[in-house]
Amino acid sequence: MAKKILIACGTGICTSTMAAKKLEESLRKKGKDKEVTIIQCKVAELVSKALDADLIVSTTTVSGKIDKPVVMGTAFLTGIGVDKVTDEIIAKLGI
């Protein structure tokens, strides 16, 4: 069963789309893209949507009580440290 990753940004549209595409590309290069499902959302939706997720990647500060691992996804916006963050995600998901 694929692990579920939530990618969150302020509006759930622009930066989360960019981060999702970069993460998917990076996972594909490492042969892990088939092991995950990526879903975008607004940071305000995280508390309710995190229940079904295995990991959260956020491009902004995550507030509230989230009981899932959170990885900062700014590397997917800047292009700096993408491999390192992708490896962190793979390790946290155990894939």
Image (spheres, grey):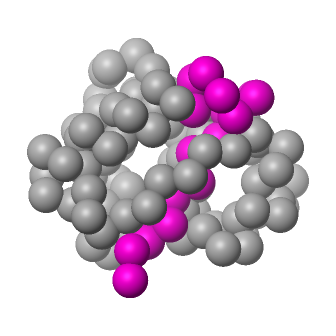
Q: Residue at x 56, y 52 (%)?
A: 39
Quarter of the image where the C terminus is located = bottom left
Question: In this picture, is 55 found above or below 63?
Answer: below
Question: In this picture, is 16 found above or below 8?
Answer: above
Corner quadrant of residue 94? bottom left
The stretch in magenta equals 1-16
User: Taking the image as drawn, is residue 60 in sight?
Assistant: no
Residue 29 placed where, x, y %? 13, 45
Residue 80 placed where, x, y %? 31, 21
Q: Nearer the viewer, residue 43 or 91?
A: 43
Residue 2 placed where, x, y %? 39, 74
Residue 86 vs residue 64: left or right? left
Q: Residue at x 13, y 58 (%)?
A: 31
Look at the image and say whether residue 36 sits in the magenta stretch: no
Corner quadrant of residue 90? bottom left
Residue 35 placed where, x, y %? 30, 68
Residue 63 vs residue 85: left or right? right
Quarter of the image where the N terminus is located = bottom left
Corner quadrant of residue 26? top left
User: Taking the image as drawn, is residue 28 in sight?
Assistant: yes
